[in-house]
């Protein structure tokens, strides 16, 4: 856990003024080894540091945490981001509207860490899985934050193979 927090802090410092090519962190391992605990603990640490660094500012949301649902679609993942931020989602809202709202609020709230858990629920071999991967990449390009991903044995799940994996 200490290693994740130290590495995460380094990455957030490196990415603080980066315009593009921000670095991220992927936590992979067997089930029950504390990946979720590690990224949530890092999120708590980062939020505490951000609050101490900017006392009295209540409009900041330094950490955004989402879980990739099983059999996720791009709209489902975008809705998870919106739900965390407290944005209302109507059944008629299309994915573009949701993404624009999420990115706008995330930038305005100065989100600097985005933790994406259960990344192993992505199956890049399916159309939806590939589209979700592209959606997460789009979020990482639009939100100036350090992205942390956690999942069960992501190397074996094929998330690092093919065009999207590389």
Image: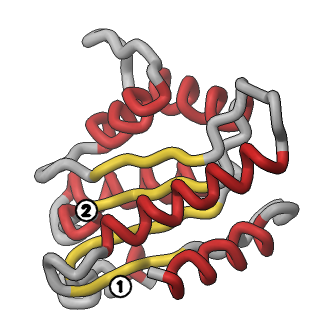
For label 1, the residue is: 160
Identify the residue at image location x=34%, y=31%.
79
Give the answer, above or below, for where 134 lies relative to 83: below
Q: Quadrant of the N terminus?
A: bottom left
Q: Earlier along the polypeptide chain: callout 1 or callout 2?
A: 2
Q: Position of residue 107 (x, y in %)?
A: 71, 36
Left or right, 146 with reference to 49: left
Q: Position of residue 14 (x, y in %)?
A: 79, 74
For mark 1, give the secondary structure.
loop
Identify the residue at image location x=63%, y=63%.
146
Task: Tell which of 100 and 70 is nearer to you.
Answer: 70
Left or right, 10 with reference to 41: right
For mark 2, give the secondary structure.
loop
Give the answer, above or below, for where 73 lies relative to 150: above
* Dot 1 crowding, Cα within 10 Å, few <14, some 14–19, many 20+: few
Q: Are marks 1 and 2 in contact (CB under 8 Å)?
A: no
């Amino acid at each position: 856990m200490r290693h994740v927090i130290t590495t995460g802090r380094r990455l957030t410092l490196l990415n603080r003024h980066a315009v593009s090519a921000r670095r991220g962190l992927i936590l992979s391992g067997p089930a029950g080894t504390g990946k979720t605990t590690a990224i949530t603990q890092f999120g708590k640490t980062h939020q505490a540091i951000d609050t101490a660094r900017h006392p009295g500012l209540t409009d900041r949301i330094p950490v955004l945490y989402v879980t990739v649902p099983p059999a996720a679609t791009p709209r489902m993942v975008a809705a998870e981001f919106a739900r965390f931020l407290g944005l209302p989602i109507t059944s008629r809202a299309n994915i573009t509207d949701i993404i624009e709202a999420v990115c706008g609020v995330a930038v305005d709230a100065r989100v600097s860490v985005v933790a994406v858990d259960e990344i192993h629920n992505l199956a890049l071999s399916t159309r939806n899985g590939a589209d979700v991967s592209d959606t997460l990449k789009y979020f990482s390009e639009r939100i100036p934050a350090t992205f942390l991903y956690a999942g069960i044995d992501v190397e074996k799940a094929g998330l690092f193979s093919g065009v999207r994996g590389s």
